[in-house]
Image (cartoon, rainbow, N blue to C red):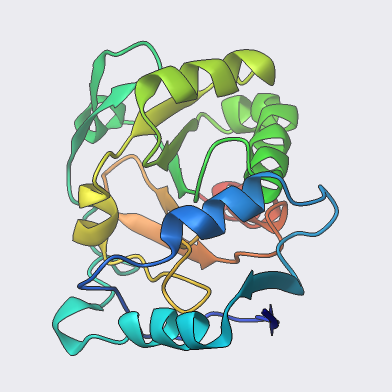
Amino acid sequence: MASLTVLIHSPPTLLHTATTKSPYDRTLSILRYAPSNSQFCGLKLSHSSSSSLRSANYCYSVKGSIFAKVNKGSKAPSFTLRDQDGNSVSLDKFKGKPVVVYFYPADESPSCTKEACAFRDSYEKFKKAGAEVVGISSDDPSSHKAFAKKYRLPFTLLSDEGNKVRKDWGIPNDLFGTLPGRQTYVIDKNGVVQLIYNNQFQPEKHIDETLKLLQTL
């Protein structure tokens, strides 16, 4: 058995998704139970060396390329997803006020929990700015409900099962395509994207950057 150490500091601008089954589930399983202070940095993935190399190759299929489809200054594409209570929620519901939409890898993973709790702790500041906060991952509504209850999250969590919205918005992956990207958008009251912030390994900075931008709207 060999140990592969992955050190990622900034995501590439273009990544490719797998057309065959990737080690995505295994990666998330490791991340869910990683020490809370790891922030995914220096994560060690232990597989056989040949398996690791094959898994890395899976992520570079030209057919599955992900390109940014939502840019600053463009209209945010609408979507309708189920929230933690199983209700259908459309992005159009938030028109007329700023909305922060943050995509994250998975409920309960250490950095995702840290990010969610940081949004929770600053929620009054978002309300003061007149903004709504919406978190999106591929977890199902029941997972979101348990996650929101456990950490007393006061905002909406939406279930993007199958990652359709993530793909439609062109959000790049990390860790050789095995980990969904952590990307936040600030959308103004007219539905126009004013900020796109991507930072996998410093989740709290998403809150700092979005609040800074909201103060200028």
Judged from this view, the residue extending furthest toward the left is 63
Q: How many marks?
A: 0
**Nearer-the-camera pick, 127 or 104:** 104
**Nearer-the-camera pick, 180 or 59:** 59
For residue 180, which quarter of the picture?
Answer: bottom left
Q: Is residue 135 above or below residue 103?
A: above
Judged from this view, the residue extending furthest toward the right is 37
Q: Is residue 7 above or below residue 196?
A: below
Query: Does residue 198 appear in the picture of this structure?
Result: yes
Who's the residue at 37% across and 22% down the image? 141
Q: Is residue 202 above or below residue 141?
A: below
- Residue 20 placement (x, y as % from top left): 23, 71
**Nearer-the-camera pick, 129 or 106:** 106
Lateral position of residue 148 relative to residue 17, left or right: right
Quarter of the image for the N terminus: give it.
bottom right
Query: Does residue 180 appear in the picture of this structure?
Result: no
For residue 107, which quarter of the picture?
Answer: top right
- Residue 210 placement (x, y as % from top left): 59, 51
- Residue 157 placement (x, y as % from top left): 44, 28
Lateral position of residue 163 relative to residue 200, left or right: left
Lateral position of residue 144 relative to residue 119, left or right: left
Lateral position of residue 145 relative to residue 124, left or right: left
Who's the residue at 64% across and 44% down the image? 109
Who's the residue at 25% across and 25% down the image? 93
Who's the residue at 63% across and 54% down the image? 30
- Residue 207 placement (x, y as % from top left): 66, 48
